Image (tube, rainbow, N blue to C red):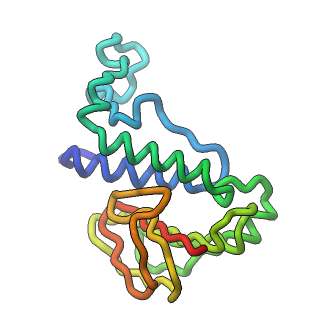
Amino acid sequence: MPGSTEADRQRAARLAQTIVFTSQGTPFMFAGEEVFRDKKGVHNSYKSPDSINAINWELKTKNADQFKYYQELIKLRKSHPAFRMTTAEDVANHIVFDDVTEPNVVSYSIIDNANGDEWKEIKLVFNGNTTPITTTIPAGNWTIIAQDGNLQASGLGKTRGGKMTVPPTSALILAQP
């Protein structure tokens, strides 16, 4: 992301891993990603020295918010079997994609207590744009799990649905018991 700020890159990293960890299949996280390791900008570090490839653990303190976000993301996935369906049939029966016209936006629901999950429905909206988007959430009692670069597996707050703004480069995750 040439010309972007570190904060912009951290938002993009959070969005990318949120997509990975809420998708079906085995998630993958690059070593040190949770502390925002950057290998000093070297893209192919195969023959680079340890000064490039070593994980700088001081970044865990510097990027504590990023580390906490990744911890919560892992906790969310481990706590909810809806993110870990094992058959194509289950995925086909429990994931419903929304008809989205905005570019760089993905929106879908995981429904019917998928894979024995305690949540009846999980609504996920990913905004890969550099501008906010507005989405309409069905009326109901929703718990906000992720919003505007923040995530808490136990919930950040409540909403009744309706029109909601999804800030740039972020995920909106809602759960309905």
Residue at the image position 40 percent from the left and 64 percent from the top: 156
Residue at the image position 23 percent from the left and 34 percent from the top: 62
* Residue 90 visible, this orientation: yes
In this view, 16 is above or below 171 = above
Task: Say which quarter of the image contains residue 169.
Answer: bottom left
Task: Please indicate whether residue 6 sits to the left or right of residue 80 in the image.
Answer: left
Q: Position of residue 173 (x, y in %)?
A: 47, 66
Q: Position of residue 105 (x, y in %)?
A: 44, 69
Which residue is at the front of the view, 56 or 142? 142
| Quarter of the picture holding the C terminus | bottom right
In this view, 1 is above or below 31 = below
Task: Please indicate whether residue 163 sits to the left or right of residue 137 in the image.
Answer: left
Residue at the image position 47 percent from the left and 69 percent from the top: 125
Q: How many marks?
A: 0
* Residue lying at the far top of the rendered structure: 49
In this view, 32 is above or below 166 = above
Which residue is at the front of the view, 134 or 62? 62
Task: Please indicate whether residue 93 sits to the left or right of residue 4 in the image.
Answer: right
Q: Position of residue 132 (x, y in %)?
A: 29, 72
Q: Position of residue 112 (x, y in %)?
A: 71, 74
In this view, 33 is above or below 100 = above
* Residue 106 visible, this orientation: no
Task: Please indicate whether residue 88 sits to the left or right of residue 167 in the image.
Answer: right
Residue at the image position 67 percent from the left and 73 percent from the top: 111
